[in-house]
Image (spheres, helix red, strand yellow):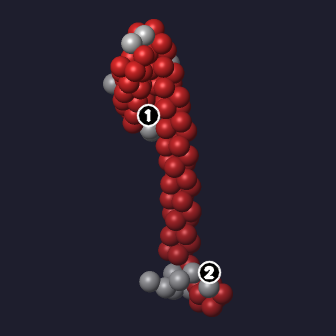
Amino acid sequence: GLVIFGRDISKIPCFRESFLYGIGTGIGFGLAAFVKTSKPMLAQHIGVGTFSLSTLLYWSYCRYRWSQQRFDAQLLQDALKDKILYEGTAVEKEMEKKGVLKTV
């Protein structure tokens, strides 16, 4: 993989998808602007601006979802550890009565 500042960018979550969406929208809007105005410099500026904006927006959205999934996975992992720890004990029966643990 490509290493920038000591990090392999292929291992960074959402990096690939963000840039692919950014490149696609930048090319699309740049070509559309060129077809509409026939001004290459304006089309280039629109394409680069659209690339930058869409990459940043998709990166933010993707990283938010990724962080949310990691948080939910950590909560589930902690709940499973508690379930295993208290399985078959009096504490489990008390927690089931309170509704904290559910039997599977």
Q: Residues within 10 Å of mark 1 (few under 14, many from 20)?
A: many
Residue beneath the point at 51% across and 63% down:
77
Nearer to me, 94 or 74: 74
Give x and y (percent) for residue 75.
56, 62
Residue beneath the point at 40% across and 21% down:
36
Q: Amino acid at mark 1?
A: Ser
Residue 98 versus residue 25 in the image, above or below: below
Nearer to me, 48 or 89: 48
Q: Residues within 10 Å of mark 2 (few under 14, many from 20)?
A: few
Q: Secondary structure at mark 1?
A: helix
Residue beneath the point at 55% across and 53% down:
68
Q: Quadrant of the N terminus?
A: top left
User: Is there any visible trace of residue 50 in the rendered image?
Assistant: yes
Residue sitting at the far left: 1
User: Which label belongs to residue 18?
Assistant: 1
Residue 39 versus residue 57 in the image, above or below: above
Q: Secondary structure at mark 2?
A: loop
Q: Quadrant of the C terminus?
A: bottom left
How far is disc 1 from disc 2 in space, using C-alphas? 40 Å
User: Is there any visible trace of residue 90 in the rendered image?
Assistant: no
Specify the quadrant of the image occupied by residue 94: bottom right
Left or right: 93 in relation to 69: right
What residue does disc 2 label?
100
Give x and y (percent) for residue 62.
49, 43
Q: Earlier in the sequence, mark 1 or mark 2?
A: 1
Specify the quadrant of the image occupied by residue 18: top left
